[in-house]
Image (spheres, grey):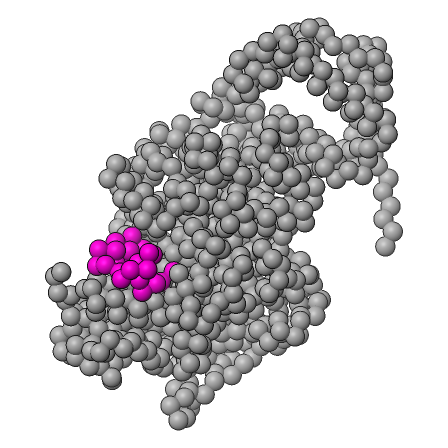
Amino acid sequence: MTLPSWTREPLVHFLILGVGLFAFFAWKGEPVDPASRTIAISQEDRARIALTWERTMQRPPTDAELDTLTETWLREEILYREALRLGLDRDDAVVRKRLSNKMDFLASSIAETTQPTDTTLRDWLDSNPQRFADDTKYSFDQLYFSEKGDAEAALGRLANADDWVGLGQSIDLPVSSEGASSQAVEKQFGIAFFEALQSIEDTGGWSGPVASGFGWHLVRLRERQVGAVPAFEDIRDRVENDWRLTTLEQRKQDAYQLLRGAYEVTVEK
Amino acid sequence: MKKILGIVVLVAVLAAAIWWLFIRHDPVAKAEDVAEAEATVAIAAYPQQVLWGDTHLHTDNSIDAFGFGTRLGPDAALKFARGEKVMATTGMEAQLARPLDFLVIADHSDALGSTKRLYNAPRFMIQDETLLRWYDMMHESPEQSQLAIAELITAASNGTLPESLTDPEAQEENNRTVWTDHLATLDKYYEPGKFTPIAGYEWTLMPGGNNLHRVVMYRDGYDRTSQILPAPALDGDLTALFDHMDAYEESTGGKVLAIPHNSNLSNGLMFELTQADGGPMTAETARRRAMREPVVEATQIKGDSESHPFLSPNDEFAGYGDVGWEIGNLSLTAYKEDDQLAGEYLREALKRGLSIEQQTGANPYKFGMIGSTDSHTSLATGDEDNFFGKHTGNEPNGERANAEQNLGTRIGRFGWNYLAGGYAAVWAKANTRAEIFDAMMRREVYATTGPRMTVRFFGGFDFGETDFTGDWVSGAYKGGVPMGGELSDEGKAPQFIVSALKDPDGAHLDRVQIVKGWITADGTTREKVFDVVWSDMDTRRSVGGKLPAVGNTVIREEATYTNDIGAPQLQTVWTDPEYRAGQNAFYYVRVLEIPTPRWTLFDAVRFGIELSEEAQKYAVGQERAYTSPIWIGSEPAAP
């Protein structure tokens, strides 16, 4: 039996969950109903008030102090309920911001404190290897020319030149680079040159002219070592950081999208 | 049922808390790993490749940055600097096209992390009325939050901050947590040889709003830096900072230096001829200053401090990035008098150094130059086309260029007065904390206003002809001293090798200049700017001692330029034609790019806005590099 497609809609899950919560609270009764004008302060409530006070003052309150604290709490609670009744929470930037922050926090709090298992993290590494791979390394020679025509002319003479270094013009860049990382090549030669180097397929021969911010280059790529993904044990911290950050963002985003989906929004322009 | 649920939740929270506090990271063990990794990095015989970094970045641990709205912390700052994509506070994705090699996060030591703590505190815990008002403002809206911080900065410069923000005992507990957490974070991102986070903080002394701020920077890792706390500044003086630095070095065996910045907002106090109390400067004070402050920040978002037209009337390129900042001090609570400018601009300070040396035998202002951002967004952007704003209130948006921006009074200074920020270029022998620090101590560094041009500068007496091929750099190191070095006067004119290579992804170069400052026997200081090599030298000849302008290819409507003018590389060997034996002097290099669009022009195109008339006047600029000087002098007589 296959379930009808509507059962897979997140909106339906959300509604079912909502109905469930509603039913639960209808049965149990909400611990604090802001609309009610009955307030019962239990032993536990008083213990909680006392504890908060104790944390600040580093000693438990006396009975008299606790009575005063209870009064203060009661006053705040009554004013809070009446404020809700008057709708003072609406259009209040502070309340609005505070509550929406709380929703974000709810969504991400689990990801913030869970300790992911090694299996989770290994899976994460396996499905995102490119984020952890070492740099590709390039070994290459290059000759510099300020004019494209000079570079083209030199290309023909390179094949049987003994002193190939002497064919290029002087510039303060290395003629030969050994095992340079992508980042190092890009830093020294610029983005345009690096992209051209990346796209060279055959190693060993001269090609070009290739443009850079300096002018023109003839290039001989001798070796390209593709970066390996380090062993999980060596980069566990990095994987965990990455997993946590991504999961956190994802949870917030998912939770929001779920709620957003239940709204119909029109914007007049 | 409710109780069981409660117990389950409580246990889970406790477990999470224990893990968070004790197991999550063990900074000491991590520091040992770091030391091991550091030891495997190869140290070159002499600096091979210049390293790029920012020594002055603020994150949400800075009292003002958080208040301005930044919600990115040190983690995001480090990720961004090493090239990862992050989400800026205002919701835009941000990534550096070219990563940095090192980063100093320099959050304000005063009330470190305290606006963040205030913001996150339960409201009922806040007793102080002022704090409570700021708390509400910060929660109300970004605009109100910025107002709250403006009030806070004014209160700081007036010395009227609420006691709980300045009371050292109240701060200590909090500072220790923020500081040690921060240090542990730095170690997490340290990849010796590749990316180097460096420990530091900003020491924010500003009597009456006159900016005497320093970035304090450490050579060491967690094991040493966690033994101390950043020095508070608000009630202190410079001697107290130097004492704090001495004490650190004595008790831990580590090393620390300080980098003054925004001398342009000090109303003449940064480089005084006298002691702070008005008496004549002693040799001891001068020596201590030079030893503690080997490097000064010459350029950053809040303006450029290299030169001012009032002080250098014959320098047609003086005054880059001065407009707006020159009218008064940091908080604009006091306007500036012309006679205060001499204590603010670096070229003049270098000259003052020579004159104090002549009188006392010691030069307090023998410093190198770097650039940095002073960004308060956690994003170390330094280029014109990626300016992410001074703080979160002016992250990219259509209004920021024309808007009034001054923090305190909101008058007199505008968005377009901000520069896009600079970078520090360091000739280190490897990308490690120790090597970067040591390069700064020997002043082998230079400043740029953002572009990453490669500049070499050597001084000596006998370089002969250099053809700039093969291994010329190692020859120059053998035959002379690099930027930041000192030559002893042997009665022979000094020679200088300069090589400037353009930013591979930037603009061509217009010219290379050598700025000379010297002192005559009667104690008068002088300066002169020499054009030593420029593009198209065959056809572009000096007319009446003045080189014609390089031209301008900027298309304002598109915020673009072309490299049809200028040169990719400028190199020369230059001998001082006006050398006089026995005159102490300094020489530094200024490299100018061809004109390019400033960030304001990029904004105008991106957001389709009209720049104000004043802003348009400054919408195109010639970006530049300043090297550390090379000094020549007779050995000072022993006091």
Residue in the picture at 50% in, 24% down: B20
Spot occupied by residue B24 in the image (x, y as percentages of width and height): 46, 26
Instruction: Tell me the quarter of the picture where residue B615 sits.
Output: bottom right
Spot occupied by residue A207 in the image (x, y as percentages of width and height): 44, 68
Residue in the picture at 16% in, 73% down: B489
Quadrant where the N terminus of chain B is found in the figure: top right
Residue in the picture at 80% in, 26% down: A14
A120, above or below B606, in the image: above
B589, above or below A42, in the image: below
**Residue at the extreme bottom of the image, as rendered:** B544
Spot occupied by residue B284 in the image (x, y as percentages of width and height): 22, 55
Residue in the picture at 62% in, 41% down: B134
A8, above or below B188, in the image: above
**Can residue B12 be seen by looking at this rendering?**
no
**Magenta segment, which residues?**
B270-295
Spot occupied by residue A224 in the image (x, y as percentages of width and height): 41, 53
